[in-house]
Amino acid sequence: MTVMTARVRNYLLCRPRHFAVEYAINPWMDATTEVDVDRAIAQWETLVTALERLGHTVHTLEPEPGLPDMVFAANGAFSVDGVVYGARFRYPQRQAEAAAHEKWYRAGGWEFITPGEINEGEGDFAYVTGPGLVLAGYGFRTDPRGHAEAAEALGRPVVSLKLTDPRFYHLDTALTVLDDETIAYYPDAFSAGSQTILRRLFPTALLADEADALAFGLNSVSDNRNVVLNAEATGMAEKLLARGYTPVPVDLSELKLGGGSVKCCIAELRKG
Ligand code: ARG
């Protein structure tokens, strides 16, 4: 098994200063839960440190009061080769986050495409560099019309994949890109037809099981070699090691109360 060399990345994250679970828009959330904000911030800082230790650049978005899910920065946009396809959130509680992301990208000189369709950014879009392919989830959050819109905005083929298990409501809870050619996914999170598509496109994919997915083992971020993932996902870490990757576990248990982990906190900035 040849493992690629790591490639340095640019990431956008948002400190969980106003993190809370005040509403429930996914099965992991319980609106009566009290979260420990200081603990969430401390855990988030360990994530930032882990990324920086690997040589990556971390950019940050200013957290806004009243937007408790803003820490899940993956959902705010999706960029490929310097072009950004903006997000349009499904639930009203998160809709104002999109403007904060748009402002950040525009200030940085990115080409920004304003979406007309509902889509939750990198939560439901993943990019496989080798084939230049966008993988896109639908069924819970992103509208499939957003997939067609993203294809047009980014000039890349988009493969639509249907998510069927509400616990895995975003693509990034059920599938992750490990390197330029390889993905890992949990087959049962997808419809039968989408499982066939994934098998055809990625015959050598790493297959995760239900325990891996429930431990947010697929909600990970890879630089082609090092895979940063939730510390509870020990089974997934073993599978990655067996394939020659280096798992980098980070404890994000507090953020899991909001239904997210490593990948949800990170938007990759693909400048091209
Ligand atoms: N509470 C957030 C929501 O339900 C969690 C988002 C997780 N983000 C992700 N990329 N999966 O919208």
Image: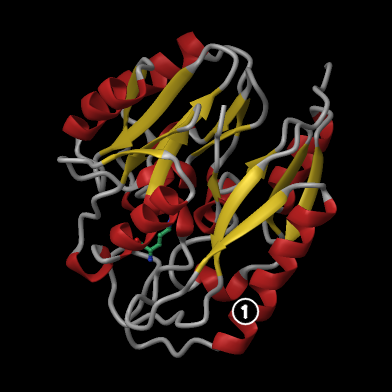
Taking the image as shown, residue 230 lies to the left or right of residue 121, namely right
State the residue in front, 90 or 175. 90
Residue 112 sits above or below residue 98 on the image: above
Q: Which residue is drawn at 49% across and 11% down?
A: 201
Q: Where's residue 102, x and y in %?
A: 35, 53
Name the quadrant containing residue 155. top left
Inspect this view and state whether residue 187 appears.
yes
Inspect this view and state whether residue 167 appears.
no
Q: Name the residue under label 1.
A: 41
Q: Which amino acid does label 1 sit on?
A: Ile
Taking the image as shown, residue 81 lies to the left or right of residue 45, namely left
Residue 64 sits above or below residue 215 on the image: below
Rendered image coloring scheme? secondary structure
Taking the image as shown, residue 239 lies to the left or right of residue 149, namely right
Q: Where's residue 39, x and y in %?
A: 64, 84
Name the quadrant containing residue 183. top right
Q: Quadrant of ligand 1?
A: bottom left
